[in-house]
């Protein structure tokens, strides 16, 4: 078991841990996809570890984590995309630490509504799926993914009408997108019923990944935040160092 925070050498790690937040990667280290911005290793996925949830639960209990983000690599090799494993992990955590707030940051489950319904009904507090970028950039940035499929997943999760589960998404700037394209994404996310949005600067994790197109200034982030709110998204966290899990508890508390 390992936290994404440690594996990705996230610059916000100490701040998040001090705030009682941590992100855990489940379903192995190898992803069946190979997004241009992501440093996770592409390869043949490993066996599912049935004890994973229990170990995460123990870590949460011992480190007084109040807000846990559970995410995973994409597992296109599994018929349910890993949804049943997500559910098992949530159950193990809830059994051991009932007070912890749980956010699931899920892959697109290949568009399976059944998988979305399964994780939405598992007792989570936040359902999160990142669009990452604007539709035009998908072929270069998120090969194997589909902007509208991702959007539909968010929309379907919202349509389940679970008032106690917030819907969240995240995007990155500085990959070559335009302001107008970002505004269209804000509009789409608002129409899909997204409650919380994070907007952060893309940073190239290794020389093999997509290059940064430009660095967005703090003032521009402030404007993007206002634009997204104007479109109807209630809570927007935006800034150069924002990551989808950074300030996750604060965003959640701002909403409820
Ligand atoms: S699907 Fe997720 S984990 Fe896999 S390469 Fe893309 S961003 Fe990384």
Image (cartoon, grey):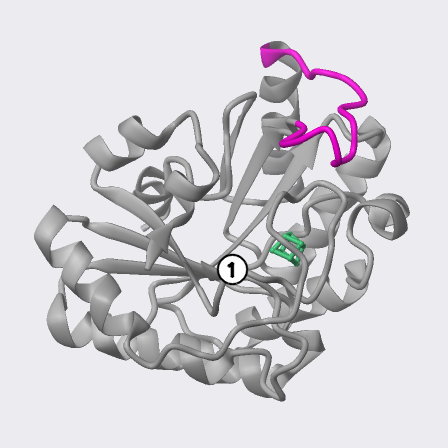
Residue depicted at x 59% and y 34%: 199
Depth order, front residue of 162/122:
122
Q: Residues within 10 Å of mark 1 (few under 14, many from 20)?
A: some
Check the image and report above or below for 58 versus 15.
Answer: below
Depth order, front residue of 73/192:
73
Residue 193 picture location, percent across and down: 59, 59
Residue 157 picture location, percent across and down: 55, 72
Q: Secondary structure at mark 1?
A: loop
- Figure quadrant of residue 137: top right
- Where is mark 1, residue-wise? 29
| In the displayed structure image, the side of residue 110 where residue 99 appears, left or right | left
Check the image and report above or below for 18 versus 58.
Answer: above
Whether residue 34 is visible, yes or no, is: yes
| In the displayed structure image, the side of residue 46 where residue 7 appears, left or right | left
Residue depicted at x 25% and y 58%: 101
Quarter of the displayed picture in which ligand 1 can be seen:
bottom right
Q: Main secondary structure of the magenta part?
A: loop
Residue depicted at x 20% and y 72%: 94
Highlighted magenta segment, given as a residue range: 204-218
- Figure quadrant of residue 249: top left
Let me know if residue 214 is in the magenta part. yes
């Amino acid at each position: 078991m390992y936290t994404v925070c440690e594996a990705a050498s996230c610059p916000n790690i100490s701040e998040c841990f001090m705030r009682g937040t941590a992100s855990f990667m489940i379903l192995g280290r190898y992803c069946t996809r190979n997004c241009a911005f992501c440093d996770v290793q592409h390869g043949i996925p490993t066996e599912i570890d049935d004890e994973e949830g229990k170990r995460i639960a123990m870590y949460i209990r011992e480190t007084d984590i109040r807000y846990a983000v559970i995410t995973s690599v994409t597992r296109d090799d599994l018929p349910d995309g890993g949804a049943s494993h997500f559910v098992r992990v949530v159950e193990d955590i809830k059994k051991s630490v009932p007070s912890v707030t749980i956010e699931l940051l899920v892959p697109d489950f290949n568009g399976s509504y059944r998988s979305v319904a399964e994780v939405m009904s598992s007792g989570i507090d936040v359902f999160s799926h990142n669009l990452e970028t604007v539709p035009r950039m998908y072929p270069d940035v998120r090969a194997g993914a589909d902007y509208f499929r991702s959007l539909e997943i968010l929309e379907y999760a919202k349509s389940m009408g679970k008032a106690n589960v917030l819907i969240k998404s995240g995007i990155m700037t500085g990959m070559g997108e335009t302001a107008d394209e970002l505004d269209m994404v804000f509009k789409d996310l608002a129409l899909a019923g997204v409650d919380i949005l994070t907007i952060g600067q893309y940073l190239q994790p290794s020389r093999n990944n997509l290059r940064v197109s430009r660095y967005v200034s703090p003032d521009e982030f402030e404007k993007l935040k206002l634009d997204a709110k104007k479109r109807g998204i209630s809570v927007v966290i935006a800034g150069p160092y924002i990551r989808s899990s950074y300030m996750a508890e604060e965003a959640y508390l701002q909403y409820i």
